[in-house]
Image (cartoon, rainbow, N blue to C red):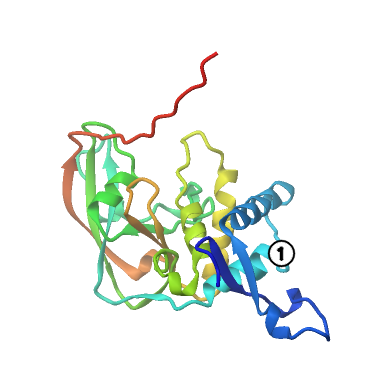
Amino acid sequence: MTSNNEIKIDLPEKYKPKSSGISQMNFDLYIATDDDVIKKWEEFKKEFLKNRFFIPNDNSFVQIYMDSIVKDEALTISKGEKYYRARIRKNRKSFEDKDLNIPPEGITNAGRLNPKFIPYLYISNDETTVVSEVRPHLDANVVISTCEAMEDLKILDLTRMDNDDSKSNNFRKMISLLFSTPYAPDDTELEYIPTQYITELIKNKGFDGVKYRSAMNFGGENICIFSASNFDISITKEIKITGIKYDFDEKTLNED
């Protein structure tokens, strides 16, 4: 019986201990705590400080953790389903539908999941989340569009198993949280590289996108789509930000 902070992950054959005197069944599962997942994640991130563009396929994080995620059943976005996308309108009188599409490849900045110059489509299933994600200022004008799926799409859902204790998916939950960690405006592009790398692994496994929790709207969810041509995008409304609410945790400072 495992505790609530343990997860079971299928261990690849090459990582199983070899012993003729002990049943191999004892090594079919690899047990890890949340702390272990975070430790492995930090070690994985440090690999990019040594080599920014290449991580060996036999890296333990990739072999053990990532392989266990992509084996799970995918979420299907059905043709005709609608999602949302937003953009702040600054010094222009109006936006056209094309302005809510992805930016051109040559000028695309690095994002949480997309490398620099390679644009992905970031959408959500609710308007509050997409507005929060663009981080509007007070009195900002935000244009919202609907994004309709033009075909069925296979999405890896990092949030689906968060409350499923029967399958011990703490690792999926931890990766979902790490994907959703807020970044400060002055963070370097290096902070994005680990999640970009994982996104490419997911893409190479045949997925059309990945779903993860919003860093800006608690309870909200985002979807990153690898090809914007899979969606028809049309502007539906414009809103003005009339108020901004901040939630915070109070920290007591040690007195001298």
Q: Which residue is under mark 1?
A: 59
Q: Quadrant of residue 21?
A: bottom right
The picture quadrant where one finds residue 30 is bottom right
In percent of width and height, residue 124 lies at: 31, 58
Farthest right residue? 20
Please provide percent x and percent y for residue 194.
59, 54
Q: Residue at x 55, y 69 (%)?
A: 2
Residue 79 location, quadrant: bottom left
The residue lying toward the viewer, choosing from 207 and 20, is: 20
Location of residue 121 with respect to 206 vertically, above or below: above
Q: Residue at x 20, y 39 (%)?
A: 93
Specify the quadrant that holds the N terminus. Answer: bottom right
Q: Secondary structure at mark 1?
A: loop
In the picture, measured across the screen, residue 112 lies left or right of residue 228, that is right
Q: Is residue 96 visible?
A: no
- In the image, farthest residue toward the top: 256
Mark 1: which amino acid? Asn
Residue 220 horizontal/vertical position (percent)? 32, 54
State whether residue 240 appears in this view. yes
Residue drawn at 70 percent across, 46 percent down: 49
Residue at screen point 53% across, 50% down: 116
Up the image or down, 28 lies above or below 159; here it is below
* Placement of 166 over or under 226, stated as above or below: below
Compared across the picture, whether 72 is left or right of 38 comes to: left
Query: Which image quarter is the C terminus in?
Result: top right
